[in-house]
């Protein structure tokens, strides 16, 4: 893009926001589901996550609010809406002064700021009764029913769908992605349902998919107040401690909320996502004995794997080289990996809940029907191999005055350990700090962990994190974090022990409930192999001898503004610039500018959300991520690289109380003379367009 149009767009966005600041409106506390989801996704710092259950729980709480006067500790903690200090102070306040008479009475509790109250307001109430006395038979049918159906596809035909010279395409099915889900929920206490999905390129029925959809999931989940606190049958999620050996679903890590570093949530939860790997299939139950809650669980399911050796006489897999977590079954090779091995998992979590402290022990054992025997690269030297793995851990949560200590230490059966310990402390009414130390031995082995870490698994990493939130005066907030980490062993694309630093700073101004703007600076410096390899010349060939490890730096600067022009219209503006620097190479730059309009007129059954974005990055390393408004229970975090424009339009329509419709179309246009995508996923021309239609029936 030429310089003149770029600055015209930037100036127009600035004028749009400056004009908006001059006006003053107030929200009535109504929060659209997409706004809540956007806030949750922002916390993940653009990582790849499974957020479906988290979205659904928040959406349900909007319609079935938490009764602050009657909610138990577990209900408040598992909602993830409150800090440990706030839960303690709220319950002490009710014990001392009786039930809250007005929601704004929370302002008399020191740990609740006005911002905190506004944030939780859509999810809480002071009325309503528990459903514990309702007969089970009534709970099974007298609730809310929802049926979702979603169709989506790329409008262009990718290479994998084009017939070759023999008249056969690489992909077995068409390029339509189909998703359907039925969910029953009784006051967030009992739920059951099923999910079915086929990805683009997968067949539906036919020789490769004789049972119709490629993926099926079903669950039954019951919460209780007596001895049985939770029961999960079918597919379910499991969360233990701080996620060093097991964490399913959504969890906060490094993010723009620097104090949200502690993992919290129910041990058991229903599973309704379409992720085909990160779940358990079987049964789990949480039983209460005094202050103890014990959760035994068992899981048995088939998983995809790359088979390396088969016993032809017994027709059994002997060894496999890797677990395939893509969930895709489009080509002949992908279909061969489907359900190749069996995974058996069992274990328990036992947690003691005191007034100020929770302490727990847990263990998980894995057994596979074949032995994992990969061809290990040097950086994978300590990875798990074999058919059996055992993890055990201890975890704690201790509130002393206003100081919250938490942590977990876990071991694998090879004797290696991982530990994580943190502290969240309010230093002053205007200043809060968070500290976290972690050490994950290179040889520590785990399979379903998801914790606070730089890498995907808690392995081969040590680090120290410090985060803060400062509110010096009304309407202003300054927050950020510093994370320093090191890898004792080799890493992917780092052929020697390496280190890194990650820094984020954000200044936010919210002069009213209708306007919010911030400036964010983020920079990360880490060691990685240089782009140019060093070779050892021989008479026959050049053999890679070693990769030079250099210090890479990537920085970004963002200005963002949200303004509620009225109760019906919200506009959002963002300008972001990125820089990628590798020693000895040309510094690469990028920028992104977008303008959003979200419109939903009061009292009308329709609304729309739209964006127009312009981006220009000089390489993939300088790419910029942006969250996009999506249909309910779907999310998009797009990484934009190259040069071009992107736009989308989403229309929502609820013609009847029992029917909701979402329609979304998006297009990315690239101006460079390079193909879009590669291999079977290559697009013709220089555009990539997708369309999506979703319907929800409620009764």
Image: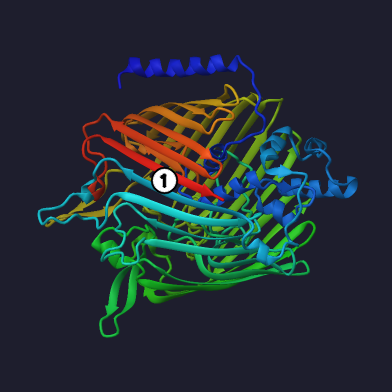
**Mark 1 neighbour class, 10 Å CA radius: few under 14, some 14 to 19, many 20 or more:** many
Q: Position of residue 443 (x, y in %)?
A: 48, 65
Q: Position of residue 245 (x, y in %)?
A: 55, 63
Q: Which quarter of the picture shows residue 334?
A: bottom left
Up/down of 691 relative to 509, above or below: below
Up/down of 472 relative to 583, above or below: above
Q: Is residue 647 left or right of residue 441?
A: left
Which sits in the foreground, 41 or 502? 41
Residue most extreme to the bottom: 313
Up/down of 50 relative to 577, above or below: below
Which sits in the foreground, 293 or 491? 293
**Count of numbered labels shown in the rendering:** 1
**Which residue shows up at 26% across the image and 63% down it?**
333
Up/down of 545 relative to 678, above or below: below
| Mark 1: secondary structure | strand
**Residue that label 1 marks:** 527
Q: Is residue 4 left or right of residue 271?
A: left
Q: Is residue 413 visible?
A: no
**Which residue shows up at 38% across the image and 42% down it?**
692
Where's the N terminus, which quadrant? top left
**Which residue shows up at 66% across the image and 26% down it?**
476
Q: Position of residue 465 (x, y in %)?
A: 59, 46
Q: Which quarter of the picture shows residue 685?
A: top left
Q: Is residue 241 visible?
A: yes
Q: Position of residue 392 (x, y in %)?
A: 58, 70
Residue most extreme to the left: 165
**Which residue shows up at 60% across the image and 26% down it?**
567
How is the rendered protein coloured? rainbow
């Amino acid at each position: 893009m030429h310089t003149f149009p770029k600055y015209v767009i930037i100036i127009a966005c600035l004028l749009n926001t400056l004009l908006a600041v001059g006006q003053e409106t107030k929200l009535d506390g109504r929060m659209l589901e997409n706004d809540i989801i956007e806030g949750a996704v922002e916390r993940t710092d653009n990582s790849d996550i499974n957020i479906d259950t988290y979205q659904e729980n928040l959406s349900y709480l909007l319609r079935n609010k938490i009764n602050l006067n009657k909610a138990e500790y577990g209900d408040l903690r598992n909602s993830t809406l409150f800090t440990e200090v706030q839960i303690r102070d709220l319950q002490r306040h009710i014990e001392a002064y009786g039930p809250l008479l007005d929601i704004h009475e929370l302002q008399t509790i020191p740990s609740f700021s006005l911002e905190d109250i506004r944030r939780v307001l859509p999810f809480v109430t002071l009325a309503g009764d528990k459903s514990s006395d309702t007969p089970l038979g009534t709970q099974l049918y007298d609730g809310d029913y929802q049926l979702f159906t979603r169709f989506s596809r790329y409008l262009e035909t990718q290479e994998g769908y084009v017939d070759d010279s023999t008249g056969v395409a690489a992909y077995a099915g068409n390029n339509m992605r189909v998703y359907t889900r039925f969910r029953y929920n009784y006051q967030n206490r009992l739920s059951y349902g099923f999910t079915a999905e086929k990805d683009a390129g997968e067949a539906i029925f036919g020789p490769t998919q004789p049972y119709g959809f490629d993926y099926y999931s079903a669950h039954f989940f019951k919460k209780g107040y007596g001895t049985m606190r939770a029961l999960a049958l079918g597919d379910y999620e499991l969360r233990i401690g701080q996620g060093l050996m097991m964490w399913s679903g959504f969890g906060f890590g490094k993010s723009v909320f620097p104090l949200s570093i502690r993992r919290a949530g129910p041990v058991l939860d229903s599973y309704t996502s379409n992720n085909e790997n990160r779940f358990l299939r079987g049964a789990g139950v949480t039983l209460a004995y005094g202050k103890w809650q014990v959760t035994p669980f068992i899981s048995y399911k088939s998983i995809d794997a790359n088979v390396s050796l088969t016993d032809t006489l017994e027709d059994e897999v002997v060894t496999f080289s890797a677990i395939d977590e893509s969930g895709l079954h489009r080509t002949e090779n992908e279909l061969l990996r489907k359900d190749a091995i069996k995974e058996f998992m069992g274990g328990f979590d036992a947690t003691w809940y005191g007034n100020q402290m929770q302490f727990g022990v847990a263990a998980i054992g894995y057994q596979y029907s074949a032995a994992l025997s990969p061809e290990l690269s040097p950086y994978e030297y300590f990875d798990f191999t074999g058919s059996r793995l055992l993890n055990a851990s201890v975890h704690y949560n201790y509130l002393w005055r206003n100081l919250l200590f938490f942590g977990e230490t876990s071991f694998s059966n090879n004797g290696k350990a991982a530990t994580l310990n943190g502290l969240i402390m309010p230093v002053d009414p205007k200043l809060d700090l968070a500290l976290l130390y972690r050490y994950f031995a290179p040889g520590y082995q785990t399979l379903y962990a998801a914790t606070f870490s730089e890498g995907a698994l808690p392995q081969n990493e040590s680090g120290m994190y410090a985060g803060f939130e400062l509110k010096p005066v009304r309407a202003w907030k300054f927050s950020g974090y510093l994370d320093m980490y090191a890898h004792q062993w080799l890493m992917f694309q780092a052929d020697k022990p390496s280190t890194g630093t990650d820094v984020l700073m954000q200044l936010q101004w919210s002069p009213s409930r209708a306007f919010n703007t911030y400036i964010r600076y983020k920079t990360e410096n880490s060691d990685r192999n240089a782009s140019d390899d060093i070779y050892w010349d021989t008479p026959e060939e050049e053999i890679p001898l070693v990769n030079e490890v250099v210090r890479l730096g990537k920085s970004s600067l963002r200005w963002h503004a949200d303004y509620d022009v009225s109760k019906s219209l919200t506009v959002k503006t963002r300008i972001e610039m990125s820089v990628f620097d590798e020693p000895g190479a040309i510094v690469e730059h990028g920028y992104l500018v977008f303008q959003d309009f979200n419109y939903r007129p009061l009292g009308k059954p329709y609304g729309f959300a739209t964006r127009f974005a312009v981006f220009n990055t000089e390489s993939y390393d300088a790419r910029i991520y942006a969250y996009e408004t999506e249909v309910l229970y779907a999310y998009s975090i797009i990484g934009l690289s190259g040069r071009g424009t992107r736009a989308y339009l989403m229309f929502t329509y609820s013609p009847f109380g029992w029917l909701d419709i979402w329609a979304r179309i998006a297009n990315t246009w690239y101006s460079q003379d390079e193909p879009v995508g590669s291999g079977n996923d290559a697009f013709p021309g220089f555009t990539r367009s997708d369309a999506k239609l979703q319907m929800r029936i409620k009764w």
